[in-house]
């Protein structure tokens, strides 16, 4: 196709645009070294070319691999492992026993490893907290949005697998697994002990009930409420969530309820008229 201006022909224009922006506007991070105002426990292991900003606090037994960047005000608890090329933006909080793979990006305000929401109700109506002593495993290339929360497991680990992308304000409950290359939009929530498969797409404000399994390649529409298992490669809508074909049909029927109501009223009047004539004979 002829063009009237300089152009680059590529098979995937969107990907081509991404490559151009990365080439001409490369992301650059500050090179603080270890800032004098950072507080590192004596046994923290620091790799090469690590940059730790002011007012960062890092607990005992933590290891920072090569090329890690930690922005100001971030807290990393004891026993964490931060993989190479990770970037933690300002005011991120990692509780103890959090492991990050290579190239993980965590945006400001995210909290990784807080206690899972687990309580036992007692006879008197009060609640006894269930100790949450597990950890969190974050795979290579995961990106976690601002103010997202991923709870630690009760036992074992809460897991976010390689390449998953979590938007801002996402909640991942304890002992859940988010599969590789899954994307979760803002304000979505995953309850405890949920298994989300590989390549799942989850819309904003969607919610998944506890102990549910979402199959590989499934799609969950925004604001859907998933209370039962979702088969692989299935798209679900609504609350409670149902397959898209059924949800669309139900929606169309709902739009016609007013017309249906008027039709029933007309039929009722006709029936009453017929019954009245029958009684008059």
Image (cartoon, grey):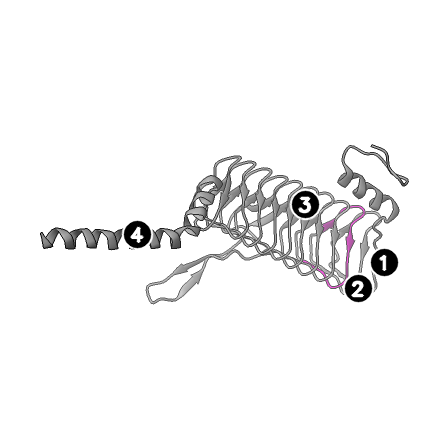
Instruction: Name the spot of residue 12 as percent of width and height, x first.
Output: 76, 35
Residue placed under numbered mark 3 in the picture: 142
Sequence-first disc among 2 and 3: 2
Give the position of the N terminus as an image quadrant: top right
What residue is rendered at 86% in x and 49% in y? 25
Are circles 1 and 4 on residues that touch, CB within 8 Å? no
Residue under label 1, please give it. Answer: 32
**Label 1 vs 3, first from the N-terminus:** 1
Residue drawn 67% across the image and 61% down it: 109
Mark 2: secondary structure: loop
Which image quadrant is residue 273 in?
bottom left
Separation (CA) of disc 1 from disc 4: 75 Å
Residue 68 counted in the magenta span = yes
Q: Residues within 10 Å of mark 4 (few under 14, many from 20)?
A: few
> What segment carries the magenta color?
63-76
Between 47 and 43, the one nearer to me in the picture: 47
Q: Which residue is mark 4?
A: 264
Real-space Cα separation, disc 3 to disc 4, in angstroms: 55 Å
> Looking at the image, do the residues carrying marks 1 and 2 touch, with CB atoms under 8 Å apart?
yes
Q: What is the secondary structure assignment of the residue under circle 3? A: loop
| Rendered location of residue 247, percent (x, y) | 45, 44
**Label 2 or label 4, whichever comes before in sequence order:** 2
Label 1 element class: loop
Q: Residue at x 27, y 51 (%)?
A: 267
Residue 243, given in percent of the width and then of the height, sits at: 46, 41
């Amino acid at each position: 196709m002829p063009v009237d201006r300089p152009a680059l022909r590529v098979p995937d224009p969107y990907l081509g645009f991404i490559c151009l922006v990365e080439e001409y506007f490369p992301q650059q991070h500050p090179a603080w070294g270890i800032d004098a105002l950072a507080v590192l426990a004596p046994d923290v292991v620091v790799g090469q070319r690590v940059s730790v900003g002011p007012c960062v606090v890092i607990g005992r037994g933590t290891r920072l691999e090569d090329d890690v960047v930690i922005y100001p005000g971030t807290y990393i608890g004891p026993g964490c492992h931060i993989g190479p090329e990770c970037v933690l933006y300002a005011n991120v909080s990692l509780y103890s026993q959090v492991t990050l793979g290579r190239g993980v990006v965590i945006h400001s305000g995210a909290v990784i490893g807080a206690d899972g929401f687990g309580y036992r109700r007692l006879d008197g109506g009060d609640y006894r907290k269930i100790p949450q002593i597990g950890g969190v495993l974050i795979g290579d290339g995961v990106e976690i949005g601002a103010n997202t929360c991923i709870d630690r497991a009760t036992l074992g680990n809460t897991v976010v697998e390689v390449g998953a992308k979590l938007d801002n304000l996402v909640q991942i409950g304890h002992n859940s697994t988010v599969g590789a290359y899954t994307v979760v939009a803002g304000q979505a929530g995953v309850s405890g002990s949920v298994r989300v498969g590989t390549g799942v797409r989850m819309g904003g404000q969607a919610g998944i009930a506890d102990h549910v399994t979402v199959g590989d390649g499934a799609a969950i529409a925004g604001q859907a409420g998933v209370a039962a298992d979702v088969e692989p490669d299935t798209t679900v809508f609504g609350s409670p969530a149902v397959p898209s074909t059924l949800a669309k049909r139900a929606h169309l029927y709902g739009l016609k309820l007013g017309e249906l109501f008027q039709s029933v009223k007309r039929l009722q009047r006709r029936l009453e008229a017929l019954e009245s004539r029958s009684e008059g004979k």
